[in-house]
């Protein structure tokens, strides 16, 4: 859906008269966006998009909005949410807060691969945004980028978070895993 003030009939791209200026303007209706152009070598974005997957799981539409809402409620409270497949046909999402309290939800999924999907961790906010694009979650392993896909062909690449092993404290209780961003 296009924003009413940003339509192609009244949009304009304006470049400054000076050829050495690093700025460009986009104008539509009463709005003007000024951006700075950047020169240089850019990485090939296609290299980041995974093309082969070992596992694919689909979250039913009847559960997807609830999962997205739950993930959004974790924003700022939990750096990661762990996805595991402990029960066949079910996705288990687990998060730990700063006090090592754990919350878990389990969602039925259809898995369309022979292999069980790998356990993997994502930032809750980014996983919520990715699942909003599509209900199909495609995974390679626990440290490679995943992908969500929608029925229209739209997709979102999502980078995992690496977790260190849970460390047992002096009383023998497991503490929350410490997040480490994937490289």
Image (tube, rainbow, N blue to C red):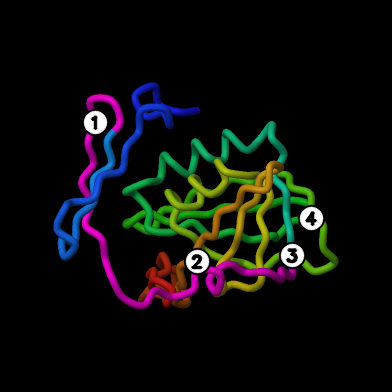
The residues tagged by marks 4 and 1 sit, at their Cα atoms, a distance apart of 46 Å
Task: Please name whichever residue, 182 or 34, is drawn nearer the observer in this view of the structure.
Answer: 34
* Residue, disc 4: 111
In the picture, the disc for residue 160 is: 2
Which residue is painted at 82% across and 63% down in the image? 113
The residues tagged by marks 3 and 2 sit, at their Cα atoms, a distance apart of 15 Å
How would you classify the magenta stretch by its main secondary structure?
Answer: loop
In the picture, the disc for residue 55 is: 3
Name the side, left or right, on which 110 lies relative to 69: right
Number of marks: 4
Label 4 vs 1, first from the N-terminus: 1
Magenta residues, as a range?
28-54
Question: Which element type, helix, strand or loop, lies under badge 3?
Answer: strand
Which residue is painted at 42% across and 27% down in the image? 9
Question: Which element type, helix, strand or loop, lies under badge 1?
Answer: strand
Crowd tier of the residue under label 2, counting other residues whose Cα lies within 10 Å: few below 14, some 14–19, many 20 or above: many
Is the residue 77 above or below the residue 84 in the image?
above
Crowd tier of the residue under label 4, counting other residues whose Cα lies within 10 Å: few below 14, some 14–19, many 20 or above: many
């Amino acid at each position: 859906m296009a924003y009413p003030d940003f339509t192609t009939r009244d949009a304009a791209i304006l470049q400054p008269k000076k050829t050495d200026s690093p700025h460009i303007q986009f104008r539509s209706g009463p709005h003007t966006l000024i951006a700075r152009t950047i020169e240089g070598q850019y990485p090939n974005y296609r290299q980041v998009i995974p093309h082969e997957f070992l596992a694919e799981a689909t979250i039913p539409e009847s559960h997807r909005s609830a999962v997205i809402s739950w993930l959004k409620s974790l924003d700022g409270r939990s750096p990661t949410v762990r996805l595991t497949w402990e029960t066949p046909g079910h996705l288990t999402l687990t998060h730990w807060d700063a006090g090592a309290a754990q919350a878990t939800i389990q969602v039925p999924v259809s898995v369309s691969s022979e292999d069980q999907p790998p356990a993997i961790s994502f930032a809750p906010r980014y996983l919520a945004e990715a699942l909003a694009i599509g209900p199909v979650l495609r995974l390679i392993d626990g440290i490679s980028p995943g992908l969500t896909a929608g029925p229209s062909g739209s997709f979102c690449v999502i980078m995992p978070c690496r977790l260190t092993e849970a460390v047992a404290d002096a009383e023998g209780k497991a503490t929350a895993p410490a997040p480490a961003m994937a490289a």
